[in-house]
Image: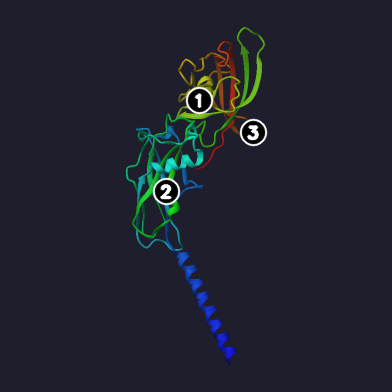
Amino acid sequence: MKYLKICMIAMIAVAMNACDRDEVFEREQYKQVIALLSEGDFNIFAEEHDPATADEEGYTDGYIAASCGGALPTTQPVTLNITEDADLLQQYNNINFATESYKYALYLPSDRYMIDHPVIAIKQGERNGRMKIRIRAGGLSPDSVYLIPLRVDKCSAYELNPNKSMVLYRVYPVNFWASTKTVPVYSHRGILLEDGTTAPINTMMTKQMLPVSGNEVRIFAGNKIVTTATASIIEKWAMRLSIDDSGNIAIRPWSDSYFGLKVAQVDGDPDYPNVVKLVDDGYGKTFKTFLLCYDYVDSDDGVTRYRMKEELKIENIITVK
C-alpha cells in the first residue's frame, strides 16, 4: 500500500512538472516581443541608394523596420518612437577599431537624410511596421562608411527586446555601373604607349570601379595596380568618369590639388571614343563596356607621360529586387 502511494505521488509530480513545462513552452511560444530588424552582432541594417533614381530634391527612400515575434498576431496597435543616439556609433567604432580612428564609420551628415516621422507603427493584427528614411547619397565619398544610429525611445505595447532595440542604418551609394556594397571588378584590356617611344605595351588586369553620383564613377588611371587605396594613392592616381544620357564620357582627375593626377581626355579615336555602352557578345550575354582614351603623367615620378587606350568590361547581370 505504501508503495502504491509513493508511485501515485511520483506520477502526480511528473504530471504537474509536465504541465509546468507545457505552460512555460506555450507562454514563450506565444510571447509577443518587439524587435528592430538588423543583421550581425552590431545591429546593422544596410540599403543601397542610387542617386540616379532620386526625386527632384535628390532623395531616395529607405526604411528601418520592426517586427513582433510570437505565434499570434498583435491584439493591439504598437507605436515605437525612434530617436537618434550618437553613443551607439561611438560604441561601434570603439569596439571595432579602438584607436584606429581613420577607420571609424561616419555619422551621415544631417543634410544627407530626412526622417519626417520618427515612428514605427505596427497595426493591430499585423506583425511588421516601417519608418521611412529619405537619403541623399549623390556625392558621398565611396571610401567612407556612413551610418545613422537609431534606437527605440518608447514602445507603447508588449515587451521590447533589449538586444534589438537599436539599429545602425548604413547607406551604400550605388549606380548602374558600380556599387560600394559589392564593388564590381571590371576586366581591363589596354594599349599603353610611353611618350617618346613607338612600341606600345598590351596590358591586361582588373580594375575596381566605385560610384560617386548617379552618373559618375571612379577608377585608377593607366595600369596602376592598387592593393591599398590610401588617401594619398587616391589623390595621385584616381580619376572621375562622368557619363551623360547618351553614354558619352568626360574624364577628369579625382583631385584638383597640386598632387592630383595629371590627366587629359583624348577624343577622336574610333576604337576608344570615350563612351560606355551595353555590348551583346552574341551568346546571350551583355557587357557594360567602357572605351577610354586619355593621356596622363606618372604620379610616382611626376615626369613620364603615357597614352592609355583601354576597354573596361563586366557582365551586365540583371537582378530583380
The answer to whether the residue labelled 2 contacts the one labelled 3, judged by CB atoms less than 8 Å apart, is no
In this view, 311 is above or below 195: below
Q: Secondary structure at mark 3?
A: loop
Residue at far left of view: 116
Residue placed at 37% from the left, 32% from the top?
Answer: 58
Q: CA distance from mark 3 to mark 1?
A: 41 Å
Q: Toward the viewer: 191 or 153? A: 153
Q: Toward the viewer: 56 or 152? A: 152
| Image quadrant assignment for residue 78 | bottom left
Badge 2, how many Cα within 10 Å: few under 14, some, many 20+?
A: many
Badge 3, how many Cα within 10 Å: few under 14, some, many 20+?
A: few
- Dot 1 amino acid type: Ala
Query: Which of the marked residues, 2 or 3, is nearer the chain's N terminus?
Result: 2
Q: How is the image coloured?
A: rainbow
- Judged by depth in the image, the label closer to the viewer, 2 or 3, is 2
Query: Which of the marked residues, 2 or 1, is nearer the chain's N terminus?
Result: 2
**Mark seen at residue 231:** 1
Q: Position of residue 60 (x, y in %)?
A: 40, 37
Query: Which of the marked residues, 3 or 1, is nearer the chain's N terminus?
Result: 1
Give the labeled residue for mark 3: 283
Q: Secondary structure at mark 1?
A: helix
Q: Position of residue 119 (x, y in %)?
A: 34, 49
- Dot 2 amino acid type: Met
